Image (spheres, coloured by chain):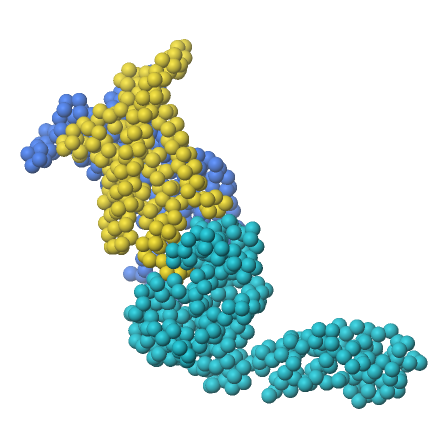
Chain colours: A yellow, B cyan, C blue
């Protein structure tokens, strides 16, 4: 193996097109999961914030979903939805919920009391307070949550190849089947690279959206 | 409508849910338009509760609160609050908005157009003497004193007729607090807002307020009078102990020098003879002599320098290090007098010499 | 649906499915033993350096990198990369895919353990440590007697996170030929047998939840402040100060 060179660079250059396609598939699978997860999490967070008692059960259920291994979660969905995109996305979305909801709720809860008192003292309605004060101030926590959710999802998407989806998992699975290190390694490294790129992009978005936090070092 | 108080509490009571004791008990109090009223008392006296009932952040259990004759319960709390300036101790600036945006918050909520909001923000920067450089900074860049001033500017932004201030200068160090209080008085002189101020600092209440309401535990009003009257005639033992042993000294801080009679002091004309000077020193029992003619004070000389001198004009005069202007308070004067060698201070009105203020004169004011 | 769940139940109730080299018991043992070994090895490799670095207030950068790497590394990818690498080493001595799975488990379990142990020790109140040193405790005494006990709940939280991840990743061992509960899922996919898939998923899920709950319990158990958190402090009365043996 060493004599042949551990990494087969020739293979890498021959498959740049495939890598690009896989990257797009991987990014789309991740994007759908994180954006659906975010929408659902915002709704559940609003419920939890409005009716405090629902927060514990919500974190319980999403916590259990988070604990169940991805492959196991797929198996529960396969009998109903088959080896489909829907199965993959339902599982991926359910992993984002706990992270996102916890960050949204604690971000909103973390808004200082004096800021809330001042804003209601100035005559903001509850809705104005939420949109103009609480959400902007919770943004650092919310974006931190989105970063974790996105990076975690990118890793998990590799597993969806086992239920017939695309993305970098295709390289990894083929690498295993053909006992070909280069291909498995390419799949793994591309996944790490995508995670790093997306994470940095989200950091950048955060900086743009929160100029006031720049110097505070968030 | 004359004689309608700006704010009226009528038999107000507040009992918090789950608490058996009342936070405010059967309290009635009126604040006239343009007046500054300080609410003061030990913690648990309901002063903050009382304040927050005016803008309905807290609702009374019983009784009525009227603002310019209208029951606050008849107005929408959000609308009501937009018409009342509100300043709190921790300021509560919105950390994600610039200083200018913070100040413009209420006008923006009221739907003013941008140009009008920014023009108003400029005016306020001017009014509270904030460095225009700070406009586009965020609150985290400001010092404690600057934050407080921005908080006051924000409350004044929509030009509300009423200001509610909850320990507005409580979170800054004493030197900054003094400066902020001074500025408050200047701004208040110009704007004449009806102001209710909660404080735990009796000196602040005395300095800033036209009338002071002293509250006891359970929100019982013990005395409601101008500072002078409270210091002179405390209504009861509670008020007296709340004012502290230095009540007399506090009173001095409210009395200007111009309210007492100045003495000519151990002073002679520059053309007087050495003998006349010695005689004057003896009469006053001091070892120094001042030289004055009319409203001009030349200076002073120590008694021992008179020995062997031919006349007063030939002596080197010393400047009075301890001097005061006539608008200073007697407390300031006391400070100057006790720390001076001459145990008297020269008082001027501008360049004009008015006379001497001696420790005895001030002492008489403490006693009465 | 009912039919399907009946089939699943039927499979689980059939004793012949539980015994034998390919039976459920054997698969559960394969799964738990490799997971346990993975957690122990990862703990031995990551906890001592984490605790020591944190005690010396060094290695901040390493900790931050470990957080990011731990999240970004796809577990499936690590298993996949380890498979071709380990094939030549140990194919003869162990079942196929054993070493690939074990190494992947250890690699993936290390970052969360390292990070939690590091922050646990680093975040112990500085004034406590100063007081401990001021009383004349040696450095090792400070670490063993103050920092580690106070950081233990957080250290255990890292172990829990890692263990749950390990149980999940061990499932992927089946893809590289190892046994474990993942076998049912992978074989089920291959045969189009939904009952087999579901049985595997159910047991993996239960195992993961049991791991979470078990370690969560342990975490509370090791908290040196737990008794004080549950009960308000008891004010000693005069009688309590007398000498008295407990029954």
Q: Quadrant of the C terminus of chain C?
A: bottom left
Q: Quadrant of the N terminus of chain C?
A: top left
Whole-percent x and y of residue B79? 35, 63
Of residues B46 and A170, the one drawn nearer to the viewer in this rendering: B46
**Quadrant of the rendered structure where residue C42 is?**
top left
Whole-percent x and y of residue B68? 38, 73
**Quadrant of the rendered structure where residue B287 is?**
bottom right
> Could one spot residue A54 in this view of the protein?
yes
User: Could you tell whether C25 is left or right of A55 in the image?
Assistant: left
Residue pictured at 22% horizontal, 24% vertical: A164
Residue pictured at 77% horizontal, 74% vertical: B320
Residue A159 to residue B230: above or below: above
**Quadrant of the rendered structure where residue B183 is?**
bottom right
Whole-percent x and y of residue C14? 8, 32
Of residues B74 and B306, the one drawn nearer to the viewer in this rendering: B74
Residue A55 to residue B262: above or below: above
In this rendering, the count of numbered labels is: 0
Residue pictured at 28% horizontal, 18% vertical: A174
User: Could you tell whether C112 is left or right of B173 in the image?
Assistant: left
Residue pictured at 50% horizontal, 71% vertical: B192
> Could one spot residue C141 in this view of the protein?
no
Whole-percent x and y of residue A118? 41, 60
Residue farthest top in this picture: A3
Of residues B32 and C222, the one drawn nearer to the viewer in this rendering: B32
């Amino acid at each position: 193996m060493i004599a042949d060179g551990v990494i087969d660079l020739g293979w890498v250059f021959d498959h740049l097109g495939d890598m690009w396609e896989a990257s797009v598939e991987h990014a789309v699978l991740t994007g759908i999961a994180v954006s659906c997860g975010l929408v659902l999490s915002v709704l559940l967070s609003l419920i939890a914030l409005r009716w405090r008692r629902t927060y514990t059960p919500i974190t319980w259920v999403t916590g259990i979903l988070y604990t169940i291994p991805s492959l196991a979660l797929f198996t529960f969905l396969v009998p109903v939805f088959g080896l489909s995109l829907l199965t993959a996305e339902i599982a991926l979305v359910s992993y984002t919920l706990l992270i996102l909801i916890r960050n949204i709720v604690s971000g909103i809860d973390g808004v200082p009391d004096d800021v809330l008192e001042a804003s209601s003292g100035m005559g903001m309605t509850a809705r104005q307070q939420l949109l103009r004060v609480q959400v902007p101030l919770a943004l650092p926590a919310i974006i931190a949550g989105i970063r974790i959710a996105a990076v975690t999802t990118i890793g998990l998407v590799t597993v969806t190849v086992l239920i017939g989806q695309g993305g970098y998992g295709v390289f990894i699975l083929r690498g295993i089947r053909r006992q070909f290190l280069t291909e498995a390694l390419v799949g793994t490294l591309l996944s790490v690279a995508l995670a790093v790129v997306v994470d940095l992009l989200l950091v950048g978005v955060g900086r743009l959206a929160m100029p006031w936090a720049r110097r505070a070092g968030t | 409508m004359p004689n309608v108080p700006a704010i009226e509490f009528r038999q107000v009571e507040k009992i918090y849910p789950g608490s058996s004791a009342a936070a405010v008990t059967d309290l009635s109090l009126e604040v006239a338009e343009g007046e500054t009223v300080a609410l003061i008392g030990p913690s648990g006296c309901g002063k903050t509760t009382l304040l927050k009932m005016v803008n309905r952040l807290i609702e009374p259990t019983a009784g009525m609160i009227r603002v310019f004759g209208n029951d606050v319960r008849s107005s929408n709390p959000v609308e009501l609050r937009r018409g009342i300036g509100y300043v709190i101790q921790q300021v509560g600036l919105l950390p994600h908005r610039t200083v200018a945006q913070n100040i413009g918050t209420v006008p923006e909520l009221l739907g003013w157009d941008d140009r009008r909001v920014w023009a108003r923000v400029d005016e306020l920067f001017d009014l509270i003497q904030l460095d225009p450089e700070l406009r586009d900074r965020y609150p985290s860049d400001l010092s404690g004193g600057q934050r407080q001033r921005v908080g006051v500017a924000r409350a004044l932004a929509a030009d509300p007729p009423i200001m509610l201030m909850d320990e507005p200068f409580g979170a800054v160090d004493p030197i900054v607090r003094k400066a902020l209080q001074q500025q408050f008085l200047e701004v208040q002189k110009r704007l004449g807002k009806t102001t209710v101020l909660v404080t735990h600092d009796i000196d602040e209440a005395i300095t800033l307020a036209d009338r002071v309401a002293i509250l006891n535990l359970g929100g019982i009003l013990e005395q409601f009078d101008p500072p002078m009257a409270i210091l002179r005639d405390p209504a009861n033992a509670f008020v007296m102990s709340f004012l502290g042993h230095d009540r007399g000294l506090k009173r001095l801080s409210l009395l200007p020098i111009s309210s007492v009679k100045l003495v000519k002091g151990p002073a002679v004309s520059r053309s007087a003879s050495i003998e006349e000077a010695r005689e004057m020193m003896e009469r006053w029992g001091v070892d120094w002599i001042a030289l004055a003619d009319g409203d001009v004070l030349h200076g002073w000389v120590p008694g021992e320098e008179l020995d062997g001198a031919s006349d007063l004009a030939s002596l080197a005069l010393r400047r009075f290090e301890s001097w005061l202007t006539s608008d200073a308070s007697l407390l300031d004067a006391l400070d100057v007098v006790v720390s001076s060698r001459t145990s008297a201070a020269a008082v001027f009105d501008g360049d004009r010499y008015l006379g001497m203020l001696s420790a005895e004169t001030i002492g008489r004011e403490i006693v009465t | 649906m009912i039919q399907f769940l009946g089939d699943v139940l039927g499979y689980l109730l059939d004793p012949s499915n539980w015994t034998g080299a390919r039976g459920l018991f054997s698969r559960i043992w394969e799964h738990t033993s490799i997971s346990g070994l993975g957690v122990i090895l990862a703990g031995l490799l990551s906890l001592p350096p984490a605790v020591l670095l944190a005690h010396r207030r060094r290695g901040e950068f390493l900790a931050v990198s470990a957080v990011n790497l731990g999240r970004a590394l796809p577990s499936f990818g690590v298993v996949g990369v380890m498979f071709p690498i380990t094939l030549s080493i140990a194919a003869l001595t162990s079942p196929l895919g054993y070493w690939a799975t074990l190494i992947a488990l250890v690699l993936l379990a290390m970052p969360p353990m390292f990070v939690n142990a590091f922050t646990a020790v680093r975040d112990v109140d500085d004034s406590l440590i100063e007081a401990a040193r001021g009383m004349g405790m040696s450095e090792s005494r400070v670490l063993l007697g103050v920092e580690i006990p106070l950081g233990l709940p957080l250290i255990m939280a890292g172990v829990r996170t890692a263990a749950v991840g390990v149980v999940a990743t061990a499932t992927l061992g089946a893809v590289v030929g190892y046994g474990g509960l993942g076998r049912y899922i992978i074989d089920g996919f291959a045969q189009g047998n939904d009952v087999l898939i579901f049985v595997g998923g159910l047991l993996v899920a239960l195992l993961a939840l049991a791991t979470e709950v078990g370690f969560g319990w342990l975490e509370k158990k090791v908290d040196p402040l737990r008794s004080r958190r549950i009960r308000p402090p008891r004010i000693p009365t005069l009688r309590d100060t007398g000498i008295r043996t407990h029954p």
